[in-house]
Amino acid sequence: SSGVANEMHLEYFRFAGRILANLLLEQASIPYLISISILKHLLGSPVSFSDLELIDSELFKHLCWIKNNSVENLGLSFTVASEHFGAMEVTDLIEGGSLVSVTDQNKDDYLKQILQNRVLGRVEAQIWYLAFGFYEVIPPQLISVFDYCELSHLISGIQEIDVEDWKENTSY
C-alpha cells in the first residue's frame, strides 16, 4: 500500500483526479493510456472478466484455464497470495476463504472474487479518491454519455497517427 510510504497518499490520488478532469476540460491530452479498469470505475461501468486480459495477461491466462478445466484436485481455496514489501500475505477473498475449497461447482464465484480483488480490492481507496477528485471538477452525469473507449480518447488522444490518412485528407 502506498499509505505505508506516505500518509497523505490518498490526497495525492484526489489531486491526480482533479488534474485529470481539468486536462479534460481544457481539451489537453496526456501521452499515457489510463487503465480500462480506472476508466470504467470513473464511468460507473462494471469491469468484465475479459478486461483482465489487458490488466494482467498472465493471470487472465491462468484463470481461463481454471474456467475451462476441472479444479477438483488443485487444492485451491478462496484466498489470494501477494507480496507486500518483501513479505508474502494471504488474503481471504470471502469471509473464511481459507477454509472454503474451490470446486467445479463454485469456481465461477472464485473467478469473480479474483477479478474483483485484482481490479479493485487492492486499490479500492486509491480509485475512490481519484474518482472523488475527478468528480469535484466534472460531475459524473456529464461523463456518463461516454463509454470507456471514448473517455480514453478524450484523455489520452489517439496513440497511433495514420500518416497516409493525413496525406489523403490534407489541403495545402
Image (spheres, rainbow, N blue to C red):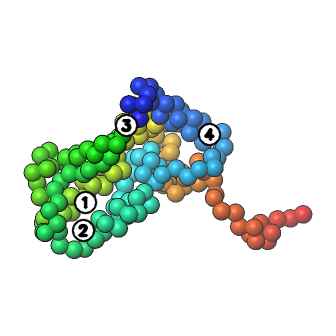
Mark 1–mark 3 CB contact (< 8 Å):
no
Mark 4, residues whose alpha carbon is within 10 Å: few (<14), some, or many (≥20)? some
Measured Cα–Cα span from mark 4 to mark 1: 36 Å
Q: Give left or right: position of 54 versus 168.
A: left
The earlier-in-sequence mark between 1 and 2 is 2
Q: Which labelled disc corresponds to residue 66?
A: 2
Residue ID for mark 1: 111
Q: Give left or right: position of 172 versus 30.
A: right
Q: Give left or right: position of 13 versus 19.
A: left
Measured Cα–Cα span from mark 1 to mark 3: 23 Å
- Can you say which quadrant of the picture contains the C terminus? bottom right
Mark 3, residues whose alpha carbon is within 10 Å: few (<14), some, or many (≥20)? few
Q: Look at discs 4 and 1 and give the one toward the viewer.
A: 1
The earlier-in-sequence mark between 2 and 4 is 4
Kindly state the secondary structure of the residue where label 4 is placed: helix
Mark 3–mark 2 CB contact (< 8 Å):
no
Q: Look at discs 4 and 3 and give the one toward the viewer.
A: 3
Residue ID for mark 3: 1
Looking at the image, is 85 positioned above or below residue 55?
A: above
Please identify the residue farthest to the bottom as the structure is shown: 69
User: Residue 86, located in which quarter of the rendered image?
Assistant: top left
The earlier-in-sequence mark between 1 and 3 is 3
The earlier-in-sequence mark between 3 and 2 is 3
Measured Cα–Cα span from mark 3 to mark 2: 28 Å
Residue ID for mark 4: 23
Measured Cα–Cα span from mark 4 to mark 3: 27 Å
Percent x, y of residue 120: 34, 46
